[in-house]
Amino acid sequence: MTTTKSAKLTDAEAEAAIASFQRIISYPTVSSTAPSTGAYEECAEFLLSELKSVPCLEGIGILDESPPRCPVVVAQWKGVHEDWPVLILNSHYDVVPAAPEDWTVHPFQAIRKDGKIYGRGAQDMKCVCEFREFGLAAMKCTWQVPL
């Protein structure tokens, strides 16, 4: 069994991660309207810029086969054994509609209150988009996956 050392963000890195998380929540990527409003493209551009800051990732871009105005963001972290199977990590940044009058906070303002962040997509699924990136950064891209 391989023992791994826990990675920890500095206070500045943690605040940057929180700010980035709040930013992705602020994009109103509602599945029924985002293709026509441009919110998907804006959010995808943000994700691309964030992923480009992670040194172990390559092939960062938009999948050629993406549906019109619905970009699929992709990146690759090559392992040390290119003949090993591929592991795909998948998430999404679209959300279901959220009427502001039904919320105690605005769903796309990513309110930070009492140590929590409130907003549409905070739990499903924008959090996964962001936490993978900051997890890789915290590990300094040195973590090896024993398959």
Image: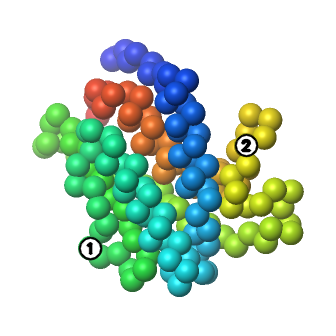
Q: Residue at x 44, y 42 (%)?
A: 132
Assign the N terminus to one quadrant of the image.
top left
In this rendering, is residue 16 above or below 39?
A: above
Residue 87 appears in the picture as rendered: no
Q: Residue at x 68, y 61 (%)?
A: 108
Secondary structure beneath dot 1 equals: loop
Residue that badge 2 annotates = 112
**Which percent across, then down, holds residue 71?**
40, 71
Residue that badge 1 annotates = 64
In this rendering, is residue 131 above or below 74?
A: above
Question: Number of numbered discs present?
Answer: 2
Left or right for 19, reference 104: left
Check disc 2 and give the amino acid type.
Answer: Arg
Q: Residue at x 29, y 76 (%)?
A: 65
Closer mark to the observer between disc 1 and disc 2 = 2
In this rendering, is residue 40 above or below 133?
A: below
In this rendering, is residue 36 above or below 70?
A: below
- Mark 2, other Cα within 10 Å: few <14 / some 14–19 / many ≥20: some
Q: Nearer the viewer, residue 137 or 46?
A: 46
Check disc 1 and give the amino acid type.
Answer: Asp
**Which percent across, then down, holds residue 131?**
50, 42
Left or right for 5, reference 108: left
Q: Residue at x 61, y 81 (%)?
A: 32
Q: Nearer the viewer, residue 137 or 145?
A: 137
